[in-house]
């Protein structure tokens, strides 16, 4: 196979095999039954002398992929370790190029294979013999292996890790240990001393040396390493790895320190450690838990009395000190390595020294320490608890620390830190559940269970909620003392707590039904969550308090609300925002509860609380507070609080109306919504003031063109205010919707239907039009159900909605269509003064009200174009159609244009209908001449109409009686575009030259005798074929768009006149016209 083809095939095979193996990343143990035969097949290729080098490298790449997924520790024992493999593998390694970036997998796997082969139980000197080659003595196999290992300890690829494994297996051989261990340690320490972590090369060298030392002190016997441990520790201290920016070096340093510490102390398990139960499951099942515990405690105590005393080397203090510092490292893997080291070394110390270590560890949990120290401390506590090294006497000191860690959250800039601390605290609780007998934790059960529930339900991060849920489940299963544990687990399991909103608003309510958890959950929300840095958490917390209020109404009214009122006028931004929202939600919940139980509001609110609620709105200086206070007003209004006649009402309404002109759009939105939510008694005497304020918000000014959301909310608020105030035809305009203000309301809403504002977000005016149409519908239905005579006879509403139902955006067209049909078919009672009601009901039958799909252009436009035949709707529908037919959306353009052409064919023989259509078309163009949104699509629509012969009726007639119609339309166009009218000359006989085309004829300057006739083609050709002063004068208008519109119109008119010209028998013109 050619080299290029082999490379491509290899890449495809590696990619395919990697994809298969990656599926086992989650559960790699599923590969165990297949590892041996896969290795055998691949190593057969390697052992075959006839295999080309690329194929051998490919086999090793496959072996590496398997090792990466399963891990080298499981894969390593499967390598063949026969004596006959030693020389071939060693020779292959010697032949490799350490700097070849394409074959590093081969070197990595060969080193691992050699680390397994070097365990053969024969003295390596037997492989050397005494044979000399060419006068040189053969290099001993021991030195060859050691040279290879040293070579690969200083490379920068993955082979360095395998070389460290090789060293740990090779140096501990009895024959190598005696001859080479001391020299190798000297070499590693000298390499470390010469290198610096400030350079890249030094970092690579130190990495390899530290890995080799850590592996060596892990696998070698204590008595073999002890003589060198102090020297290695001293060298490590001199390196000052804690100052390095390289995370891997600090982690390897921490790993080596703990291995050195384990070398200094005897490898014996502490007799004083806490043991729960027996290792035998049968023994645990046959005996009562308490009896077994008492027996094990007694045995442990007796063994502790017999414990042999021995001196602890002074280096242990240094080791433990470095590990405690490592618990505060900035990287998690360094802290995790230090925590494991603390656990391992503490297990070999006497009880008193171990207790000192625990005391020093608890110093990490102060608020002067960083979150890194808290996280490392939690990991270390979990390790100590899991190993039985944290005695029950220390639990009373540890539990308060863990409870604080479960809620640890420190603000840092725009975010916070502490999620890793909370996660590690959950791990501690999980470890304690497995380590201690239930009797030891009984005094702390309520605290731990409540803290875990709070973390599982209210923590911001999903990983912490799930960790807390898992820890709670472990305690329920192993301790069996958590109150209502099984019931809670069914609602707050690992998967259920994944949705934060569901946790706050649903699961919390269920758990609060158990009295042991109700008050702790409420206190946590009030103390920790309403002042949270994340506004989403604050808002969810206040909603959760609303839902929890029925579970503890008296506690909320008498304790929580009085605590929140001072906070709602405090200086801290987040606390004040959350407190205002919490007051609003709790007040609303308490009022609903009072109404359900037929109690007075004063049952829950004393005079001080009511006065405090009134004062919250004062001194607002931040946008967040405006939103919060608007929510408060809404909730107080829904709660029907007894504030009628209070001066605060006048102040609030006046302030809200004045804030409608705030330069911030969101402020306008918030106060518009608040005014729309006011109850009727607040509107009484102030209705006209509120309506006028909302009307001003809907008006477009240069400084607020982009405030589409504010205009939308104001329109929605107008409808809500009208519904709340009610209708009374002869009533006062300050209290009711009446004959004096209904026209103003309709004018405001109808004016908003014409909002076509656009900005970088697109057609934002669509939001305004949508809200205006809905508000028009709601106000009209309100009037017809109460005072139908207030509805205007003209009923221009239907025309405006019809226009919107003919436009191009599907969403707004569907909304307009829904409003149109609702108004048309409303029966309780029917809406009066709808123009052409009978014809409309034939076009839109009641049976199709729910089934007609306005979003589909194929269904909407064939219906809406039928309204062109109704004079009252023709202008509005044609205005909407011009935008759709001249638009860019293919589906909308196709169906709208086809529906328009179908209508034009129907009226081709009806001169009055056709003339009326043309009059309307000209009126649309005249009204929107300077409006690009309409005029440009209108030109495109006319182009299509001319191309489809919609105006052929004006050209096919040869009677001069038809010519005045064309002349009149032409003159209207010229007047609209402010251009001179074409002159009329006489008609002559047809000439051959004229038949060759209008443009050629225009340049001949021929003169003919004729009767008077239209010569528009010559005029148009004069405009487009010459650059006369007349042309420049007429096109140099201030607006380029008008120039383009004028040009397009004349071009279309040229096409129309060309047809007229070709249909005429004779014509004459002058290019000096």
Image: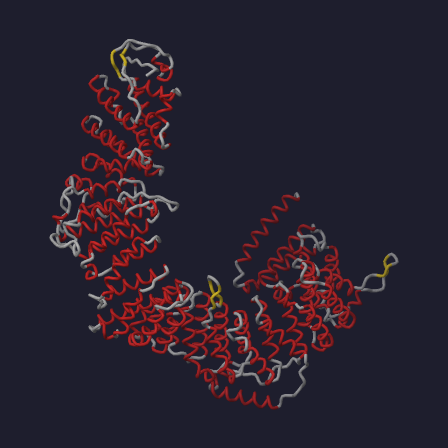
The answer to whether residue 188 is left or right of residue 505 is right
Q: Residue at (19%, 27%) from the top-left corner?
A: 910
Locate the C terminus by quadrant: top left
Q: Position of residue 673 (x, y in %)?
A: 28, 57
Which one is in front, 429 or 649?
649
Q: Is residue 12 above or below residue 969?
A: below
Can see residue 543?
A: no
Locate the N terminus by quadrant: top right
Q: Residue at (65%, 67%) from the top-left corner?
A: 241
Which one is in front, 809 or 689?
689
The answer to whether residue 268 is left or right of residue 990 is right
Which residue is most to the right?
135
Q: Position of residue 416 (x, y in %)?
A: 47, 65
Q: Position of residue 114 (x, y in %)?
A: 70, 63
Can see residue 326?
A: yes
Image-quadrant location for residue 90: bottom right
Q: Residue at (74%, 76%) from the top-left corner?
A: 227
The answer to whether residue 209 is left or right of residue 69 is right
């Amino acid at each position: 196979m050619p080299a290029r083809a082999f490379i491509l095939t290899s890449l495809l095979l590696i990619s395919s095999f990697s994809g298969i193996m990656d599926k086992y990343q989650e559960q790699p143990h599923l590969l165990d039954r297949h590892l041996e035969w896969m290795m055998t097949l691949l190593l057969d290729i390697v052992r075959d002398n006839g295999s080309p080098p690329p194929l051998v490298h490919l086999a090793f790449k496959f072996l590496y992929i398997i090792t990466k997924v399963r891990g080298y520790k499981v894969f390593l024992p499967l390598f063949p370790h026969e004596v006959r493999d030693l020389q071939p593998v060693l020779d292959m390694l010697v032949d490799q190029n350490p700097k070849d970036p394409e074959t590093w997998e081969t070197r990595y796997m060969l080193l691992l294979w050699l680390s397994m082969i070097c365990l053969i139980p024969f003295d390596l000197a037997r492989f050397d013999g005494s044979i000399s080659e060419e006068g040189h003595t053969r290099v001993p196999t021991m030195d060859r292996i050691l040279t290879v290992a040293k070579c690969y300890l200083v490379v920068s690829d993955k082979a360095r890790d395998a070389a460290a494994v090789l060293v740990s297996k090779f140096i501990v051989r009895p024959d190598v240990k005696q001859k080479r261990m001391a020299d190798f340690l000297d070499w590693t320490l000298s390499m470390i001393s010469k290198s610096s972590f400030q350079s890249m090369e030094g970092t690579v060298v130190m990495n390899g040396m530290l890995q080799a030392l850590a592996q060596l002190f892990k696998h070698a016997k204590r008595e073999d390493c002890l003589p060198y441990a102090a020297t290695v520790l001293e060298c490590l201290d001199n390196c000052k790895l804690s100052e390095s920016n390289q995370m891997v070096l600090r982690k390897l340093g921490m790993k080596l320190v703990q291995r050195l510490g384990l070398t200094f102390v005897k490898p014996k398990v502490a007799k004083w450690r806490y043991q729960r139960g027996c290792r035998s499951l049968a023994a645990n099942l046959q005996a009562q838990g308490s009896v077994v515990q008492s027996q094990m405690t007694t045995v442990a105590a007796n063994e502790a009395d017999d414990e042999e005393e021995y001196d602890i080397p002074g280096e242990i203090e240094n080791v433990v000190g470095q590990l405690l510092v490592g618990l505060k490292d900035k990287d998690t893997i360094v802290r995790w390595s230090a925590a494991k080291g603390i656990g391992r070394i503490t297990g070999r110390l006497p009880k008193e020294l171990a207790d000192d270590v625990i005391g020093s560890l608890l110093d990490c949990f102060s608020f002067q320490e960083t979150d890194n120290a808290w996280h490392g401390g939690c990991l270390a506590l979990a390790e100590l608890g899991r190993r039985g090294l944290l005695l029950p006497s220390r639990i009373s000191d540890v539990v308060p620390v863990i409870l604080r860690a479960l809620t640890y959250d420190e603000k840092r800039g725009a975010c916070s830190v502490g999620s890793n601390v909370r996660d590690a605290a959950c791990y501690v609780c999980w470890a304690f559940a497995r380590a201690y007998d239930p009797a030891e934790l009984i005094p702390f059960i309520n605290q731990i269970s409540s803290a875990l529930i709070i973390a599982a339900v209210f923590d911001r991060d999903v990983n912490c909620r799930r960790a807390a849920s898992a820890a709670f489940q472990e305690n329920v299963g192993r301790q069996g003392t958590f109150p209502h544990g099984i019931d809670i687990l069914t609602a707050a399991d690992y998967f259920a707590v994944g949705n934060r909103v569901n946790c706050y608003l649903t699961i919390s309510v269920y758990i609060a039904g158990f009295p042991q958890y109700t008050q702790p959950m409420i206190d946590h929300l009030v103390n920790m969550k309403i002042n949270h840095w994340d506004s989403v958490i604050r808002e969810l917390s206040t909603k959760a308090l609303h839902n929890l209020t029925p579970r503890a109404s008296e506690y909320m009214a008498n304790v929580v609300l009085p605590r929140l009122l001072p906070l709602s006028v405090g200086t801290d931004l987040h606390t004040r925002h959350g407190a205002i929202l919490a007051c609003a939600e709790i007040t609303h919940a308490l009022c609903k509860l009072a109404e359900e139980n037929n109690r007075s509001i004063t049952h829950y609110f004393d005079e001080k609380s009511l006065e405090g609620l009134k004062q919250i709105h004062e001194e607002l200086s931040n946008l967040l507070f405006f939103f919060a206070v608007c929510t408060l007003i809404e909730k107080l209004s829904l709660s029907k609080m007894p504030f009628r006649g209070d001066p605060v009402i006048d102040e609030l309404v006046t302030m809200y109306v004045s804030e409608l002109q705030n330069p911030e759009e969101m402020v306008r939105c918030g106060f518009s919504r608040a005014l729309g939510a006011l109850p009727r008694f607040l509107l009484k005497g102030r209705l006209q003031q509120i309506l006028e304020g909302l009307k001003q918000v809907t008006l477009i000014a240069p400084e607020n063109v982009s405030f589409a959301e504010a205009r939308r909310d104001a329109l929605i608020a107008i409808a809500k205010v009208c519904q709340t105030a009610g209708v009374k035809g002869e009533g006062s305009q300050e209290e009711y919707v009446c004959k004096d203000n209904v026209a103003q309301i309709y004018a405001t809403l109808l004016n908003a239907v014409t909002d076509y504002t656009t900005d970088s977000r697109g057609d934002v005016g669509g939001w305004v039009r949508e809200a205006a149409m809905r508000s028009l519908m709601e106000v009209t239905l309100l009037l017809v159900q109460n005072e139908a005579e207030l509805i205007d006879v003209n009923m221009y509403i239907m025309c405006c909605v019809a226009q919107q139902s003919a436009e191009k955006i599907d969403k707004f067209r569907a909304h307009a269509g829904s409003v149109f049909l609702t108004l048309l078919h409303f029966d309780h009672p029917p809406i009066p003064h709808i123009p052409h009601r009978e014809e409309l009901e034939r076009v839109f039958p009641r049976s199709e009200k729910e089934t007609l799909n306005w979003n589909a252009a194929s269904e909407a436009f064939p219906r809406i174009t039928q309204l062109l035949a109704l004079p009252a709707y023709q202008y509005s529908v044609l205005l909407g159609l011009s935008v759709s037919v001249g638009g860019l959306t293919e589906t909308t353009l196709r169906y709208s244009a086809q529906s328009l052409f179908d209508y034009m064919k129907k009226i081709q023989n009806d001169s009055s209908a056709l003339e009326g259509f043309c009059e309307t078309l000209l009126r649309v163009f005249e009204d929107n001449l300077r409006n690009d949104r309409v005029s440009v699509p209108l030109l495109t629509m006319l182009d299509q109409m001319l191309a489809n012969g919609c105006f052929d009726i004006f050209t096919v007639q040869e009677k001069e009686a038809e010519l005045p119609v064309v002349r009149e339309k032409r003159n209207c166009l010229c007047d609209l575009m402010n251009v001179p009218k074409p002159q009329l000359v006489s008609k002559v006989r047809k000439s051959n030259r004229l038949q060759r085309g209008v443009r050629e004829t225009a340049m001949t300057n021929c003169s003919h005798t004729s009767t008077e006739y239209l010569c528009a083609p010559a005029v148009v050709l004069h405009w487009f074929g010459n650059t006369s002063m007349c042309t420049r004068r007429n096109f140099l208008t201030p607006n380029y768009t008008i120039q383009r519109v004028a040009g397009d119109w004349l071009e279309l008119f040229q096409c129309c006149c060309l047809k007229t010209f070709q249909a005429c028998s004779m014509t004459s013109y002058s290019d000096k016209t």
